[in-house]
Amino acid sequence: MGTPGTRIAARAAMTRPLELPIPRTLDAIVNRNRALCEIGLATPSEIDGLRGDIDAPAGAEKDVLTDWRFIAFRIRQHQTALVLLGDAERQSLILCTSEVQVASRDGARVRTRNSIYALARAGEGEPPVQHLLQLCATLHEWGLGRILGALEVW
């Protein structure tokens, strides 16, 4: 049963905040099989490699992204895939796109395999924690989360 002091100490221990391994950087998302894949901000040369024309009328965009960043998945054997991570204004959610196929020369739009997105205000530096958690959830949705040891988020 314990003494009253013991009970108070036990209750105090239970009220401490739960510490989860929440990633604070893109690099911290990958906790397993780091030799297979690295995740980080895309470099200007990686983005420039996607520059091209997007043949679609104005207004064809699925959504407008703000606070966005190009994220690079650097896969062994020198393969790199870029996605966009940011706030989707129309859908009111944090979005990680599928692989970007083309980034417009003026930097105003991108095309993935199935969608076109307009780009508004870009984010700077590492993404905020909410975006990192969405990326973890997306990795699990894509079947990559467990392989890369990403935090399980749903």
Image (cartoon, rainbow, N blue to C red):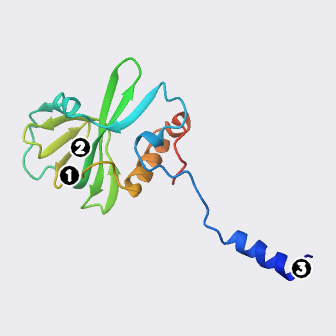
Quarter holding residue 50: top left
Comparing 140 with 32, the one in front is 32
Residue 100 rendering spot, x and y as whole percentages: 25, 36
Percent across and percent down for residue 52 are: 11, 31
Foreground disc of the pair 3, 1: 3
Give the labeled residue for mark 1.
122
Q: Give left or right: position of 3 versus 82.
A: right
- Left/right of residue 24 with respect to residue 120 in the rendered view: right
Task: Categorize mark 2 by other alpha carbons within 10 Å: few (<14), some (14-19), many (20+).
Answer: some
Residue at which label 3 appears: 3
Residue under the image location 48 percent in, 24 percent down: 35
Image side of residue 49 versus residue 37, left or right: left
Q: Residue at x 61, y 62 (%)?
A: 18
Q: Residues within 10 Å of mark 3 (few under 14, many from 20)?
A: few
User: Is label 2 in a helix, a strand or a loop?
Assistant: loop
Q: Which mark is residue 115?
A: 2
> In terms of sequence position, does the residue under pointer 1 or pointer 2 come before the other?
2
When asked about the image quadrant of residue 8, the answer is bottom right
Coordinates of residue 127 in the picture (x, y in percent): 34, 51
Q: Amino acid at mark 3?
A: Thr
Secondary structure beneath label 3: loop
| Kind of residue sitting beneath label 1 | Ala
* Outermost front residue: 5
Residue at the spot 24% in from the left edge and 52% down from the top edge: 123
